Amino acid sequence: MQVSVEATSAIERVITITVPAARIDDKVSSEVAKTAKTVRIDGFRPGKVPLNVVKKRYGQGIRLEAIEQVMRDAYVEAVQKENLQPAGMPSIEPKDMSEGSDLEFVAKVEVYPVVELADAANISVERVISEVTPSDVDTMLETLRKQNADWVAVEREAADGDQATVDFVGYIDDEAFDGGEAKDHKLVLGSNTMIPGFESGIIGMKAGESRDVMVTFPDDYQAEALKGKEAKFVITTSEIAEQSIPELDDAFVEKFGLAESTVDALRAEVTKNMERELNQAVKAKLKNALFDGLLANNPIDVPSALVSQEVDGLREQAAQQFGGQGFDSSQLPAELFQDEATKRAQLGLLISEVIKQNEITVENDRVQSFLEEMAQAYQEPQQVVDFYLKDKERLAQIQSAVLEEQVVDKLLESAKVTEITLGYEDAIKPKAEAATKVEESAEA
């Protein structure tokens, strides 16, 4: 068998393979003999059909199947002989399949790129230094109070921040339009959930009052027929309610199911949760910055098969977020995820190379610590730890996360690190371009 390999790009190989005719003939003869033992032909006893009869009736089909099998086997042999690392399935094109001639075919396949890592000293990152202050805890407790507020009906004019229960009908040129009507709609004034002018038009109204409010739909409004149009909304209020924020006392604390229903206990629990969130956010920022630096310093081509795998994973995540069970993720265009999938595939190859070059192996004590820290967010931490330790698939996910942490530690040994001090709110805030992705992950 003759093999020649041409590198048409950093990751594509064109393999030309020539298989001797004798190998094809031997394979065909073998398959004809097998067929003769099982085939049934009138006039012959089972297993006694002459080979020439079998070859005459089934020879063409047997030869094509034999050629396909020989090409598959020869391709595998060629890949092993040339020490290639295919990253996906090949495309195979026969060149000469004529009987009595050597079989020649061409296989095109993408291979894993050769990765030569640049010095990690070229990577510059910022390490965030932050802490949870008593003032931060006070702010969080105030947020909890507002989240648990009730709406209480009032007999006065609506003001900014009130909740108005309204019926409304929208008109353009004195004709009601589709989607412009609602009944008993609860709207917090100042929430900016409606088009500009709608909420401000309700301010000053009392329960039972009606008012015409003129608005103009934005030029970038989602409904094409309404873009830039002036509309009149006839709005009737049935209730005006103001927020009643509960006192921060022991009765309020009971809602959270703590072992001890005291304000001090709630403050301690909130502090612990905020510190855990802060720690995770700071670690994530540093990891993302290091990995971005790793990508910037090591541009590589990636096989399309790896990108396709990442696209499929991102599609599934999006399907779970938007459609839940039963949503066909294949309906989502691959182009939506192409850039992120390519980045993930590149990063996966680079991280693997860091692990390989530095002979990094997962540290079991770090896996245990990772699990215990993660489990603190649950009511029964030990049950969570035991659950992961008993599930090989989920444990493998944790081990992979720990291995990434060890890669981060290795990169930090060489990278240029600058420390910056941020307040809690800024420290936990994701980068602007990553904000949407973080929200999607949390919802998923």
Image (cartoon, rainbow, N blue to C red):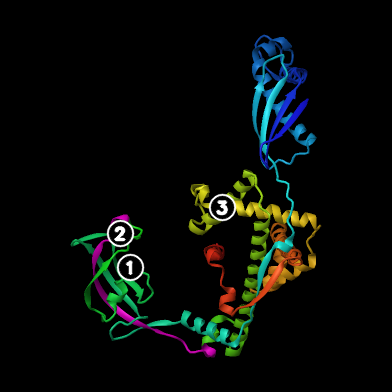
Residue 195's disc number: 1
Q: Is residue 317 visible?
A: yes
Q: In the depicted view, which residue is nearer to us: 298 or 23?
A: 298
Q: Residue at x 49, y 52 (%)?
A: 327
Q: Is residue 17 magenta?
A: no
> Dot 3 surroundings within 10 Å: few (below 14), some, or many (20 or more)?
few
Residue flagged by tag 2: what amino acid is it? Lys
| Residue 163 screen position, x and y as percent | 35, 78
Q: Residue at x 64, y 61 (%)?
A: 292
Q: CA distance from mark 2 to mark 3?
A: 31 Å
| Residue 324 screen position, x and y as percent | 51, 57
Residue flagged by tag 3: what amino acid is it? Asp
Residue flagged by tag 1: what amino acid is it? Ile
Which residue, given by chain and number where applicable, does mark 2 sit on? 227
The numbered mark, 3 or 1, whose residue comes first in the sequence reads 1
| Residues drawn in magenta | 224-251
Q: In the depicted view, which residue is nearer to us: 91 or 246?
A: 91
Q: CA distance from mark 3 to mark 1?
A: 33 Å
Q: Is residue 262 visible?
A: no
> Dot 1 surroundings within 10 Å: few (below 14), some, or many (20 or more)?
few
Q: Residue at x 28, y 86 (%)?
A: 156
